[in-house]
Image: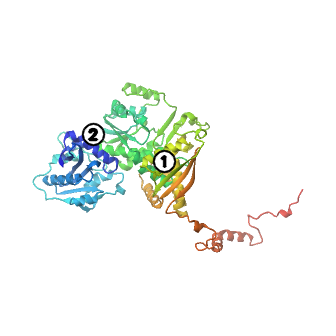
Amino acid sequence: MNIRAARESDIPDILRLVSDHARRGDLLPRTAISIRETLGDWLVGKDEDGDIVACVSLFYYTPVLAEVRSLAVADKVKGQGWGRTIVKTLITRARQNGVPTLFALTRAVDFFQKAGFTITQRERFPEKVWRDCQFCPIQEACDETAVVLHLNEPTTQRVTTQRVTTHRMAIPLSPVQHVSPSKKGILSMPKAKVNKVVLAYSGGLDTSVIVPWLKENYGCEVICFCANIGQGDDELKGLEAKALASGANKIYIEDLRHEFAKDFLFPMMQSGAIYEKEYLLGTSIARPLIAKWQVAIAEAEGADAVAHGATGKGNDQVRFELTYKALNPTLKVIAPWREWDIRSREDTLAYAAKHNVPVTHTVKSIYSRDANLWHLSHEGGILEDPTNEPEEVMYQWTTATENAPDKAEVVKIDFEQGVPVAVNDMQLPPAQVIANLNNLGAKHGVGRVDLVENRLVGMKSHGVYETPGGTILYKSHQALESLTLDRDTSHYKAEMAIRYAELVYNGKWYTTLREAMQAFVDKTQETATGWVKVKLYKGNVTVIGRYSPHSLYREDFATFGQEDVYDQRDSVGFITLFGLQMKVKAMHEVSDGGKTRYAAPDYSKFKRD
């Protein structure tokens, strides 16, 4: 196996390999710049075809402590020993450099134990916990184990102070300060101005104009981030070229559809959360995911600010900024709509022309829309008057009920512990489950909602939503739970779903309360395994069958003639006790010869005409 030190030409391949694992949630994302700045501490493995198939880096916290990080092995060579060999080589390098202690946070505990590491407590490495882990969105629910390896005592061959300083430069040393290098490599406090900002970027007119505005008003580098959460290829087409042409220094475009479905949509669906009885929270639930990745990229890039294009009137500003606060409160938040003088589309176009921002010349829709894997929303236009019926040309996804097929379609959905895993007996990954159900539901006009809702900021708004797949999933999941949840748990869960929906709508995804609620929801899903059949017809979703191996419904228990489970004579005592307070109240009312307030009139005293 060809294991060697990384070279400049290896950076794109390292980035690609690490990014593949980051998308799966196995590693934290790295950037080309961060890899280049620490290139001397990376090892790579090349196969006989000349491809980079393994990589790992050694991150120095101090001259006596280093972390094994970004260990990645290509799928095509899994099981061939590349991981074991490259880590062994890294250990040899660390020993040669006189580093006495190596550690790692990992889920692959057995792998590291075979390499000589032992399990320990992460609190033993405050350098990691207080510099890196405090900014991790899943710190409280971390499923990684700390492992440590003690090498030889340090020798005269040490990592130079300059090298250690270089590594520390990108790491926040406390919740309230960052460090940056001077020309001589000495640590110094940054200037008050913003140096680098990560912008939530969609490629639309507003966010395209924000790019040069940030550079002009803050004198900073701008890194654009776009999350692919199923908004469609048309919105993503040419995005990189447009961002760079607008003045961005770099752009990240991450495919987060499966993460969106698995870690956000499905947990919310399992809770039963519906805002104000109708809204399935399609826009609300997407914002914490986008903001989470913004923060992660800001940390990887050493950015000191994040920005968004939400206006000062809506809910999204709250959702973005609460997530920023929860995940990294040290980042400065820039909301141009609360600062700039742009007040109209004409102002925006004029600013774009002045700064050579490429603008696609299309007729602007009278509607404001938000699209993702879960839904499509419409606001504005004639909807500003709630007495108006939405015009059919407004809908872009679902078929009108009068134009939907005249023949019903039956769909079967399989669940495993509350997670939908198959549609019509075809196993599918999370995002594809939703995509398939969207197509089926949209064809039959399922999932249209016309709603006047109460915004968090205090005003009402009128919106129309199309959520075909989500509507089918909510209906099916509820039918499955009707079999698997007992009465008290089911009723309590329904009450809690209202509060859960408020938390999602208000942007409080990363809160202790939401996580505590999720723990309860997860417990209720342990038996939510089985299948549900629904019939789609003219906008309706009708449950026509459900099954679970954990069903609490037993035909033999429910049969009136069965006496070994339930003796009908027991009902006398039950009814007496259950209605005792009603009986006592009525007895009190008649004790002095009176009548209960519910007594029927004496019709015999009425004369007929």
Residue kind at label 1, given as amino acid type? Tyr
Q: What percent of the width, then of the height, locates residue 368?
A: 50, 35
User: Residue at (60%, 42%) from the top-left corner?
Assistant: 406
Q: Where is residue 144, by image quadrant?
A: bottom left
Identify the element where label 1 is drawn.
helix
Q: What percent of the width, then of the height, locates residue 364?
A: 48, 29
Q: From the viewer's perspective, is 150 left or right of 240?
A: left
State the CA–CA distance, disc 1 to disc 2: 37 Å
Q: Where is residue 382, by image quadrant?
A: top right
Q: What percent of the width, then of the height, locates residue 237?
A: 39, 34
Compared with 511, 580 (above or below) is: below
Please say whether residue 592 is visible from this viewpoint: yes
Work out which quarter of the rendered image holds the C terminus and state it: bottom right
Please give the label number shown on residue 505.
Answer: 1
Please say whether residue 322 is visible from this viewpoint: no
Q: From the viewer's perspective, is 451 left or right of 582?
A: left
Circle 2 crowding by C-alpha within 10 Å: few under 14, some 14–19, many from 20: few
Q: What percent of the width, then of the height, locates residue 597?
A: 74, 64
Sooner in the amino-acid sequence: mark 1 or mark 2: 2
Residue linked to disc 2: 191
Residue kind at label 2, given as amino acid type? Lys
Visual colour scheme: rainbow
Instruction: Name, please, the residue furthest toward the right.
Output: 609
